[in-house]
Image (tube, rainbow, N blue to C red):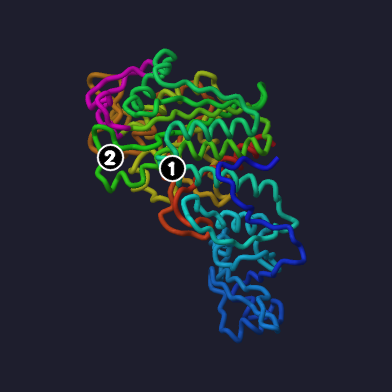
Amino acid sequence: MAPYQFIERPTPFNTKGGSTLPIFAVTPAHIETGTIDPIALDWARRAGYKAESGSLLLIPTAEGHLGGALYGLGTNPSEQPYITGRLARALPAGDWHIETAPLTANRLALGFGLGSYRFDRYKSEKSPAATLMIPRDADAADIKRQLAGVFLARDLINTPTNDMGPNQLEAVFRGLAAHYKAEMSVISGDDLLTQNFPLVHTVGRASADAPRLLELRWGKKGHRKVTLVGKGVCFDTGGLDIKPAASMLLMKKDMGGAANVMGLALMIMDAKLKVDLRVIVPVVENAISSNAFRPGDIYRSRKGLTVQIDNTDAEGRLILADALAYADEEEPELLIDMATLTGAARVALGPDLPPFFTDDANLAHDLTEASLETDDPIWRLPLYSGYEKDIRTKFADLTNAPAGGMAGAITAALFLKRFVSKAKSWAHFDIYGWAQSERPHSPGGGEAQAIRALFHHIRESLR
């Protein structure tokens, strides 16, 4: 069975064997020492080709037809492990194979696949693309499932809210569950109140699309309990504390946490990992209407803790609070939440390095190792207890928006921590979910962050 796809697209890979054109991936040293194909070497030297990182030189045949390509890796290919991603966008359309490359087969093919991503759903004209033959010593099935998970997250984030509101996100969630024969349930609208999800209802009640809580269950009871929670704010106006126009432009991506946990769940289910998987996604639109929640309101959460609303634009932690409390009730062995939660995380680490928080030192070590092994960057920030005082308030147990603006990513994580007490291990990921510029493995736009590292960690923990 092929991995789930939300947007059907052609595979970036081919299986044509001898009918493909060769690519010689080379460093400057290969050119200097002459350790590549003689015809390619002669053409490179005549053209003054230096094999700079990401450079492409097409090679003609003696008859003047396209005969192959040289692709530069630069002097230190290890600095850009997915440099072949740029190759996917630079090559002319056609079927290709790697003839030589000082890269591992898996990195080579995965990099090409990641870089091949296109979001052309709204384009009238779609141009053909190059395809690559996966090397025989690569794990083709694993590469394809990782790409499917990453592409799902990218597609969901890139899709504008008029086509990815709460109703449409639920439909994709249903499609993912059906593809892998998972159980799925939905609690929607006022049923959120009767079933004790008051904060999810509060944040989403002003929208024309009802707020809801999506839940997926897959796997076998008795296996390791892994629970994923993702923030699903399909659009965030900021509520009554409305965002300025410039800050609202990218708010279609505020469901990036949901998109990423769905991509991770796809990988886990497609790999048939021996886990008892549970995925919980609270889905809302933070809209403005006569019944929108207000600054100064106080609400009781599922866990019983009361929360004072000091800023309606700090809504993500509210819906996560109910979802985490619900997830925590089953005492999972591993509880992961992902959210596009704070601008403070971006100020601290920038858009490409998502922070994570956990009070489990062993888990932090293992996640860091997984990040290094997969070149999927993450960085641990502290759950510094000295800032606990900042999330307290005079009239309620907690505030959703501490005054002062300092350490915003940490205080948000400390807020969420108050709703997790039974899980054996918990980690919170404050992701950006967006690539601001083109990189070798990404053309820019909606981005999957940390899920390849998390998938690697979960898989390795079961060995």
Horizontal placement of 458 versus 419: left or right?
Answer: right
Q: How far is mark 1 from mark 2, CA to CA?
A: 19 Å
Is residue 318 visible to us here? yes
The one of 454 and 91 positioned closer to us in this rendering: 91
Q: Which residue in the protein does label 2 denote?
A: 406
Q: Amino acid at mark 2?
A: Met
Task: Point out the image quarter for the N terminus.
Answer: top right
Res 424 → quadrant = top right
Secondary structure of residue under mark 2: loop
**Residue 184 on the magenta span:** no
Q: Quadrant of the C terminus?
A: top right
Q: Which residues are magenta?
A: 287-313
Crowd rating for badge 1 (residues with CA inside 10 Å; few <14, some 14–19, many 20+): many
Disc 1 on helix, strand or loop? Answer: loop
Dot 2 surroundings within 10 Å: few (below 14), some, or many (20 or more)? few
Rendering quarter of residue 268: top right
Instruction: Judge from the rendering whether residue 145 lies leftward or rightward of residue 282; answer left or right.
Output: right
**Magenta segment main secondary structure:** loop
Residue 14, image x, y percentages: 69, 58
| Residue under numbered circle 1 | 431
Q: Nearer the viewer, mark 1 or mark 2?
A: 1
Residue 459 placement, left or right of 356: right
Q: Nearer the viewer, residue 304 or 446?
A: 446
- Residue furthest right as drawn: 18
Q: Which one is earlier in the sequence, the residue at label 1 or at label 2?
A: 2
Q: What residue lies at 23% left-to-right and 19% top-to-bottom?
A: 395
Disc count in the image?
A: 2
